[in-house]
Protein backbone atom coordinates (compact mmCIF):
# COMPACT_ATOMS: atom_id res chain seq x y z
CA UNK A 1 0.00 0.00 0.00
CA UNK A 2 1.30 3.44 -0.82
CA UNK A 3 1.93 6.34 1.52
CA UNK A 4 -1.19 8.19 0.41
CA UNK A 5 -3.38 5.29 1.47
CA UNK A 6 -1.69 5.13 4.87
CA UNK A 7 -2.35 8.88 5.28
CA UNK A 8 -5.97 8.30 4.27
CA UNK A 9 -6.46 5.83 7.13
CA UNK A 10 -5.64 8.58 9.64
CA UNK A 11 -7.18 11.48 7.76
CA UNK A 12 -10.70 10.05 7.56
CA UNK A 13 -10.80 8.00 10.78
CA UNK A 14 -13.63 9.05 13.11
CA UNK A 15 -12.36 10.51 16.37
CA UNK A 16 -15.55 11.19 18.32
CA UNK A 17 -15.46 8.48 21.00
CA UNK A 18 -17.77 8.31 24.01
CA UNK A 19 -19.40 5.84 26.38
CA UNK A 20 -22.94 4.87 25.37
CA UNK A 21 -24.95 4.52 28.56
CA UNK A 22 -27.91 2.88 26.80
CA UNK A 23 -25.84 -0.08 25.60
CA UNK A 24 -23.10 0.12 28.27
CA UNK A 25 -20.28 -0.02 25.70
CA UNK A 26 -17.72 2.29 24.12
CA UNK A 27 -19.10 4.08 21.07
CA UNK A 28 -17.83 6.08 18.11
CA UNK A 29 -19.88 8.65 16.21
CA UNK A 30 -19.12 8.49 12.47
CA UNK A 31 -19.66 11.85 10.73
CA UNK A 32 -19.90 12.57 6.97
CA UNK A 33 -16.64 11.73 5.24
CA UNK A 34 -15.43 9.53 8.11
CA UNK A 35 -15.19 5.81 8.83
CA UNK A 36 -14.16 3.58 11.71
CA UNK A 37 -13.03 -0.04 12.12
CA UNK A 38 -12.70 -2.13 15.25
CA UNK A 39 -12.08 -5.62 16.57
CA UNK A 40 -13.62 -4.72 19.95
CA UNK A 41 -17.07 -4.98 21.49
CA UNK A 42 -18.39 -1.50 20.80
CA UNK A 43 -21.09 0.35 18.87
CA UNK A 44 -20.62 2.59 15.82
CA UNK A 45 -23.25 5.31 15.46
CA UNK A 46 -24.20 7.62 12.61
CA UNK A 47 -27.12 9.75 11.42
CA UNK A 48 -27.91 9.63 7.70
CA UNK A 49 -29.93 11.81 5.39
CA UNK A 50 -29.12 11.49 1.70
CA UNK A 51 -25.71 10.05 2.61
CA UNK A 52 -25.11 6.29 2.72
CA UNK A 53 -23.40 4.18 5.34
CA UNK A 54 -21.92 0.76 4.63
CA UNK A 55 -21.43 -1.48 7.67
CA UNK A 56 -18.96 -4.21 6.73
CA UNK A 57 -17.64 -7.07 8.86
CA UNK A 58 -15.85 -10.39 8.75
CA UNK A 59 -18.76 -12.57 9.84
CA UNK A 60 -16.43 -15.19 11.33
CA UNK A 61 -13.87 -13.00 13.11
CA UNK A 62 -16.19 -10.20 14.21
CA UNK A 63 -13.87 -7.49 12.84
CA UNK A 64 -15.96 -4.71 11.32
CA UNK A 65 -16.45 -1.08 10.53
CA UNK A 66 -18.72 1.66 9.21
CA UNK A 67 -18.32 4.54 6.77
CA UNK A 68 -20.51 7.55 5.95
CA UNK A 69 -20.28 9.07 2.49
CA UNK A 70 -22.03 11.02 -0.24
CA UNK A 71 -21.35 11.02 -3.96
CA UNK A 72 -22.90 14.48 -4.30
CA UNK A 73 -22.16 14.95 -7.98
CA UNK A 74 -24.27 17.27 -10.09
CA UNK A 75 -25.61 14.55 -12.34
CA UNK A 76 -24.42 16.17 -15.54
CA UNK A 77 -21.39 13.97 -16.19
CA UNK A 78 -21.74 10.26 -16.70
CA UNK A 79 -18.03 9.60 -16.31
CA UNK A 80 -16.29 8.98 -13.00
CA UNK A 81 -16.34 12.43 -11.42
CA UNK A 82 -14.23 13.45 -8.42
CA UNK A 83 -17.22 12.96 -6.13
CA UNK A 84 -18.00 9.51 -7.54
CA UNK A 85 -14.36 8.63 -7.00
CA UNK A 86 -14.79 9.75 -3.42
CA UNK A 87 -17.60 7.22 -2.98
CA UNK A 88 -15.30 4.50 -4.30
CA UNK A 89 -12.47 5.77 -2.10
CA UNK A 90 -14.73 5.70 0.97
CA UNK A 91 -15.61 2.07 0.33
CA UNK A 92 -12.08 0.99 -0.49
CA UNK A 93 -10.47 2.65 2.51
CA UNK A 94 -12.98 0.94 4.83
CA UNK A 95 -12.42 -2.49 3.30
CA UNK A 96 -8.64 -2.10 3.10
CA UNK A 97 -8.43 -1.10 6.76
CA UNK A 98 -10.53 -4.13 7.73
CA UNK A 99 -8.18 -6.40 5.78
CA UNK A 100 -5.22 -4.70 7.46
CA UNK A 101 -6.51 -5.60 10.95
CA UNK A 102 -7.21 -9.23 10.09
CA UNK A 103 -10.50 -9.49 8.18
CA UNK A 104 -10.61 -11.75 5.12
CA UNK A 105 -12.34 -10.53 2.01
CA UNK A 106 -13.96 -13.92 1.38
CA UNK A 107 -15.74 -13.68 4.77
CA UNK A 108 -16.99 -10.09 4.48
CA UNK A 109 -20.66 -9.19 4.59
CA UNK A 110 -22.30 -5.76 4.37
CA UNK A 111 -25.38 -4.00 5.69
CA UNK A 112 -26.23 -0.69 4.02
CA UNK A 113 -28.38 2.24 5.04
CA UNK A 114 -29.39 5.75 4.03
CA UNK A 115 -29.99 7.44 0.71
CA UNK A 116 -33.11 9.21 1.92
CA UNK A 117 -34.73 12.06 0.01
CA UNK A 118 -34.46 14.51 2.88
CA UNK A 119 -32.82 17.63 1.39
CA UNK A 120 -34.99 19.67 -0.95
CA UNK A 121 -31.91 21.20 -2.58
CA UNK A 122 -30.67 17.74 -3.62
CA UNK A 123 -33.97 16.12 -4.59
CA UNK A 124 -33.80 17.11 -8.25
CA UNK A 125 -30.38 15.47 -8.68
CA UNK A 126 -31.60 12.26 -6.95
CA UNK A 127 -28.50 12.09 -4.76
CA UNK A 128 -30.05 9.61 -2.33
CA UNK A 129 -31.12 7.24 -5.10
CA UNK A 130 -27.74 7.43 -6.78
CA UNK A 131 -25.93 6.83 -3.49
CA UNK A 132 -28.05 3.74 -2.86
CA UNK A 133 -27.45 2.42 -6.38
CA UNK A 134 -23.72 3.11 -6.12
CA UNK A 135 -23.19 1.20 -2.86
CA UNK A 136 -25.18 -1.82 -4.06
CA UNK A 137 -23.29 -1.88 -7.39
CA UNK A 138 -19.93 -1.53 -5.63
CA UNK A 139 -20.60 -4.42 -3.25
CA UNK A 140 -21.87 -6.62 -6.08
CA UNK A 141 -18.73 -5.90 -8.12
CA UNK A 142 -16.51 -6.77 -5.14
CA UNK A 143 -18.44 -9.95 -4.41
CA UNK A 144 -19.45 -8.84 -0.90
CA UNK A 145 -22.95 -10.09 0.00
CA UNK A 146 -25.49 -7.64 1.41
CA UNK A 147 -27.03 -9.20 4.51
CA UNK A 148 -29.45 -6.32 5.19
CA UNK A 149 -30.42 -2.97 3.75
CA UNK A 150 -32.63 0.00 4.57
CA UNK A 151 -32.29 2.46 1.70
CA UNK A 152 -34.24 5.36 0.14
CA UNK A 153 -37.55 6.62 1.64
CA UNK A 154 -37.92 10.22 2.85
CA UNK A 155 -36.70 10.01 6.46
CA UNK A 156 -33.30 10.52 8.04
CA UNK A 157 -32.03 7.50 9.98
CA UNK A 158 -29.95 6.94 13.09
CA UNK A 159 -27.94 3.72 12.80
CA UNK A 160 -26.32 1.74 15.61
CA UNK A 161 -23.93 -0.98 14.40
CA UNK A 162 -22.24 -3.62 16.57
CA UNK A 163 -19.41 -5.01 14.40
CA UNK A 164 -18.55 -7.95 16.65
CA UNK A 165 -22.03 -9.50 16.26
CA UNK A 166 -23.34 -7.75 13.15
CA UNK A 167 -26.37 -6.45 15.04
CA UNK A 168 -27.88 -3.24 13.67
CA UNK A 169 -30.56 -0.97 15.09
CA UNK A 170 -32.10 1.62 12.77
CA UNK A 171 -34.31 4.44 13.98
CA UNK A 172 -36.30 6.47 11.44
CA UNK A 173 -36.20 10.13 12.49
CA UNK A 174 -39.72 11.23 11.57
CA UNK A 175 -39.25 14.55 13.34
CA UNK A 176 -35.91 16.34 13.38
CA UNK A 177 -35.53 18.73 16.31
CA UNK A 178 -32.68 20.69 14.75
CA UNK A 179 -30.96 21.26 11.43
CA UNK A 180 -27.60 19.72 12.39
CA UNK A 181 -27.93 16.78 9.96
CA UNK A 182 -28.90 19.00 7.03
CA UNK A 183 -26.09 21.45 7.78
CA UNK A 184 -23.49 18.68 8.02
CA UNK A 185 -24.57 17.12 4.72
CA UNK A 186 -24.59 20.47 2.91
CA UNK A 187 -21.12 21.31 4.22
CA UNK A 188 -19.87 17.84 3.27
CA UNK A 189 -21.32 18.16 -0.25
CA UNK A 190 -19.59 21.53 -0.63
CA UNK A 191 -16.24 20.04 0.49
CA UNK A 192 -16.54 17.25 -2.07
CA UNK A 193 -17.13 19.75 -4.87
CA UNK A 194 -14.22 21.98 -3.84
CA UNK A 195 -11.56 19.45 -2.83
CA UNK A 196 -10.05 16.72 -5.03
CA UNK A 197 -9.72 13.20 -3.70
CA UNK A 198 -6.44 12.74 -1.88
CA UNK A 199 -4.92 9.95 -3.92
CA UNK A 200 -6.29 6.63 -5.10
CA UNK A 201 -6.01 3.22 -3.54
CA UNK A 202 -6.77 -0.27 -4.75
CA UNK A 203 -8.46 -3.09 -2.92
CA UNK A 204 -6.11 -5.83 -1.98
CA UNK A 205 -7.57 -9.33 -2.17
Image (cartoon, rainbow, N blue to C red):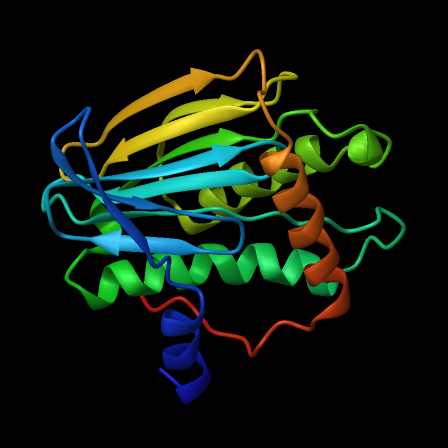
Against 45, residue 17 (above or below) is below
Q: Position of residue 28 (x, y in %)?
A: 29, 46
In the picture as drawn, the residue positioned furthest to the top comes out as: 174
**Which quarter of the figure is the C terminus placed in?**
bottom left
State left or right for residue 82 relative to residue 46: right
**Quadrant in the picture for the N terminus:** bottom left
Observer able to see residue 44: yes
Residues 103 and 36: in front is 36
Would you say 162 lies left or right of 53 here? Answer: left
Occupied quadrant, residue 43? top left
Residue 84 lies, in percent from the top left, at: 67, 56
In the rendered image, which quarter is residue 134 located in? top right
Which residue shows up at 45% across the image and 71% down it?
202
In the image, 150: left or right of 16? right
Quick one: which residue is furthest to the front in this view?
Answer: 178
Image mark count: 0
Residue at 42% across, 37% down: 46
Direction from residue 147 to residue 47 in the image, left or right: right
Could you tell me if residue 80 is visible in this image?
Answer: no
The residue most toward the bottom is 3
Picture coordinates of residue 52 (x, y %)?
A: 54, 38
In depth, the one of 80 and 174 nearer the eye is 174
Residue 131 drawn above or below residue 13: above
Q: Tell me the residue at 70%/24% (across/down).
A: 117
Compared with 168, 2 (above or below) is below
Give the camera-side residue of 59 and 160: 160
Question: Is residue 148 shown above or below 16?
Answer: above
In the rendering, at what x and y percent does residue 122 appear?
A: 79, 36
Amino acid sequence: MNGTAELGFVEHLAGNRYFDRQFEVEAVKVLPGEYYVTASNMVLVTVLGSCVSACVRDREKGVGGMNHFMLADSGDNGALSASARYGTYAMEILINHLLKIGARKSALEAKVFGGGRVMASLTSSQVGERNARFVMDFLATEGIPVAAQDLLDVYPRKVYYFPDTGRVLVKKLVRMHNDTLMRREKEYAARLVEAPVAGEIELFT
